[in-house]
Image: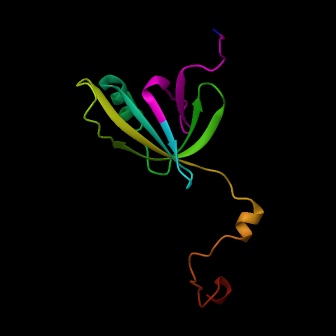
């Protein structure tokens, strides 16, 4: 059997503080959508899911985090929420949480140039007029 340099943990790190949470990858499934949203399905024993809830307890829906899958490198994301999942086939002492993240990055100049305007509001005066 070949040894791998990839460790068995999914690690989340808060940017504001130096706090980390490590989750075993055997309890995790990651789904990525086309709209840069990442859903991390976490089915684990109750004490582990409670740790996850406590880690994100003071987070706002716009806070930034970094995550690392198996020690392959840190990736930035915005925290979007933590919701309860539903799975009737889980043992009694297990819980199911879904962590929602959104990839963040700065748009390129081409993307900014081609960006669709979302508002047509134009003020009738400028700062110099007042």
Q: Is residue 119 above or below residue 4?
A: below
Q: State the scheme by which the image is colored.
A: rainbow
Residue 66 spot, x, y in % from top left: 58, 37
Q: Residue at x 58, y 83 (%)?
A: 120
Residue 113 to residue 127: above or below: above
Number of numbered callouts drawn: 0
Residue 33: in sight, yes or no? yes
Q: Which residue of the protein is positioned furthest toward the right in this rendering?
A: 109
- Identify the residue at image location x=55%, y=56%: 35
Residue drawn at point x = 63 percent, y = 21 percent: 6
The front one of 102 and 13 is 102
Relative image position of residue 89 (x, y in whole percent): 27, 31
Viewer-closest of 83 and 87: 87
Residue 12, position in %: x, y?
A: 52, 32
Question: Which residue, as the protein is rendered here, is positioned at the far front?
Answer: 1
Q: What is the quadrant of the N terminus in the image?
A: top right
Tell whether position 56 is magenta.
no
Q: Is residue 24 visible?
A: no
Point out residue 113 in the picture as x, y percentages from the top left corner.
74, 70
Give yes or no for residue 15 being in the magenta stretch: yes
Identify the residue at the far top of this view.
Answer: 1
Determine which quarter of the picture holds residue 70.
Answer: top right
Measuring 37% from the left and 33% from the top, which residue is drawn there?
54
Q: Which residues are magenta?
A: 2-29
The answer to whether residue 97 is above or below residue 114 is above
């Amino acid at each position: 059997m070949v040894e791998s340099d990839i460790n068995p943990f999914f690690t989340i790190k808060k940017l504001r503080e130096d706090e980390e949470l490590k989750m075993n990858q055997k309890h995790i499934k990651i789904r990525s959508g086309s709209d840069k949203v990442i859903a991390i399905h976490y089915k684990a024993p109750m004490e582990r899911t409670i740790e996850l809830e406590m880690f994100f307890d003071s987070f706002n829906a716009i806070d930034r985090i970094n995550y690392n899958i198996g020690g392959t490198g840190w990736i930035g994301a915005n925290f979007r929420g933590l919701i309860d999942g539903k799975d009737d086939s889980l043992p009694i002492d297990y819980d199911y949480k879904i962590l929602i993240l959104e990839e963040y990055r700065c748009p390129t100049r081409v993307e900014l140039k081609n960006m669709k305007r979302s508002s047509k509001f134009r003020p009738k005066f400028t700062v110099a007029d007042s």
